[in-house]
Amino acid sequence: MGANSGKAAIFDLDGTLLDSMGVWDQVDIDFLGRRGIEVPDDYMSTVSSMQFRQIAEYTIKRFDLDDTPEDLMNEWTEMATHAYATIVEAKPHALQYLAYLRQSGAKLAVATTLLPSMRVAAMRHTGLDEYFDVVCSVDEVGDTGKEEPDVYLKAAQLLNVEPKNCTVFEDILVGIRSAKSVGMHAWAMHDDSSDLDWQTICDEADGIMFDFSDAPVRL
């Protein structure tokens, strides 16, 4: 029996396993730039936990755009999928840590807000797709983003591991709070997109990382 057998690790993709926030910064800059708008300072942190359609509706309302949510989602998907398939990389030491966890007997899941086209492209491009037993998306569990724990609970259920034996790896405060609200452990990955919340994240998470060399040896 490995050190982590009977345990599960549930990973966010964007900003946690994937060094990808630069992609969304660039998509936002290019998308709003096409419309003559500069990206406001609080925009990225405001939308970071929302589902895709919520972001589209919020963006239309905030900037008084004539587009439909479908227009925005299609444009963003095209821009981002190309980037995820070609330039996004895994965070430092991520692949080594996943290999270690698998060897230790832990079960592994992804819990993400990324759309399937981007998720598949990124995981294939980075080699992450080899490591996971289960991949869950917020779109599969109803209308909530990560401000509710549904996607983490779904991952635990599919892995057949009790929530108390799950450790969630996240870069956003609402995800950490959701995971902890159902008795899961939560480790925080630093990402520039969460700088505004970083002090609170440090206070509330069970541990913090700047890359996966800081990750826990035992779950």
Image (cartoon, rainbow, N blue to C red):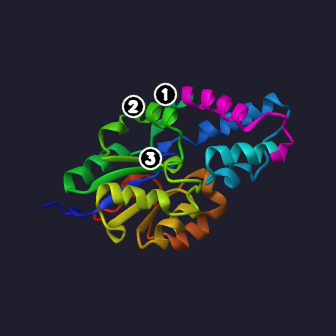
Which amino acid type is shown beneath numbered disc 3? Leu
Which residue is found at the position 63% from the left and 39% from the top?
24
189 is higher (above) or lower (below) than 185: above
Front tag of 2 and 3 = 2
Q: Nearer the viewer, residue 64 or 128?
A: 64
Which residue is found at the position 27% from the left and 54% from the top?
107
3 is higher (above) or lower (below) than 66: below
Residue 173 image offset from top left, x and y in percent: 57, 63
- Please, what secondary structure does the residue beneath circle 3 have? loop
| Separation (CA) of disc 1 from disc 3 | 15 Å
Residue 16 image offset from top left, x and y in percent: 48, 50
Residue 147 image offset from top left, x and y in percent: 58, 62
Mainly helix, strand or loop, the magenta region? Answer: helix
**CB-based contact (under 8 Å), mark 1 and mark 2:** yes
Q: Nearer the viewer, residue 150 or 88?
A: 150
Q: Is residue 151 left or right of residue 127?
A: right
Mark 1 or mark 2: name the one nearer the start of the chain.
1
The residue beneath circle 2 is 124
Query: Which label number is shown at residue 17?
Result: 3
Which residue is found at the position 75% from the left and 53% from the top?
42
Q: Is residue 99 left or right of residue 17?
A: left
The residue beneath circle 1 is 85
Residues in magenta?
61-82
